Image (tube, rainbow, N blue to C red):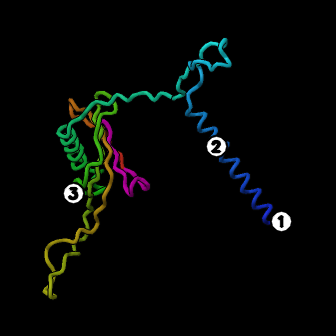
Amino acid sequence: MQPLSMNLFSTIQLAIVLLGLIAAAHIIEAFAPSVSSLPCSQGFKGMGQVSFTPKRNRIPALSMVKVSEKEAKVGIDKVVNALRKDKTANAELGKLVKVENVLGFGSPTPGTLAVRFNASFQKGGMGRASVPLPFGLGQSKVSEGRGVMVGQVKASLDPKTGKLLSCSVFRDLGYGRSFDLKV
């Protein structure tokens, strides 16, 4: 006689196998074509024809307008200039130092250009932190770069007029606060 734990173990194994078979049957049913245009076998000669029609969900095609790199660079420059000129952006984020990397650009709807990039912002500090010179010779006049925050900028603008439609800067990879530029 087998111990109770072995019977329980084999019952659980059998249940897992049955669940796997049921799941496989559902997957096959979802991807298998339906039977409606197959010629019938010899046993069903008077029944007509059966055809296969695939059960696929049609995904609508997205109509994206192609945007060149040159157009994207012009758009990014306009966004950078707008962020540098805005006093509330400078007060909250700091001075936009440079664009780190371009994450993407495109035209999700006709008549708009969407850009997304990472940019470094630096708030003015005391300016006392500087890079030390070698051999204990004092300090250089080059700052260490403290107080730099990298934020993700997401903006959309009109490519014909260059007018900014919306601009958001996400700090902390989008998990923290965000700054929305008033347009």
Instruction: Give the magenta-colored segment's residue range.
Output: 165-178
Q: Quadrant of residue 6?
A: bottom right
State the SS at label 3.
strand
Q: Residue at x 29, y 53 (%)?
A: 118
* Marks 2 and 3 in Cβ contact (< 8 Å): no
The N terminus, quarter of image: bottom right
Amino acid type at mark 2: Ala
Residue 171 drawn above or below residue 44:
below
Precedes in sequence: disc 2 or disc 3: 2
**Residue 66 in the figure: left or right of residue 44:** left
- In the rendered image, residue 163, in percent from the top left (x then y), is placed at 24, 34
- In the rendered image, residue 69, in percent from the top left (x then y), is placed at 20, 40
User: On the image, numbered disc 3 is attached to which residue?
Assistant: 97
**Residue 138 in the figure: left or right of residue 145:** left
**Residue 174 in the figure: left or right of residue 41:** left
How crowded pointer 1 is (Cα within 10 Å; few <14, some 14-19, many 20+) is rated as: few
State the SS at label 1.
helix
Specify the label residue 23 is tagged with: 2
How crowded pointer 2 is (Cα within 10 Å; few <14, some 14-19, many 20+) is rated as: few
Q: CA distance from mark 2 to mark 3?
A: 55 Å
User: On the image, numbered disc 1 is attached to which residue?
Assistant: 4
As drawn, which residue projects farthest toward the right?
Answer: 1
Q: Report if residue 13 lies within the magenta region.
A: no
**Residue 33 in the figure: left or right of residue 73:** right
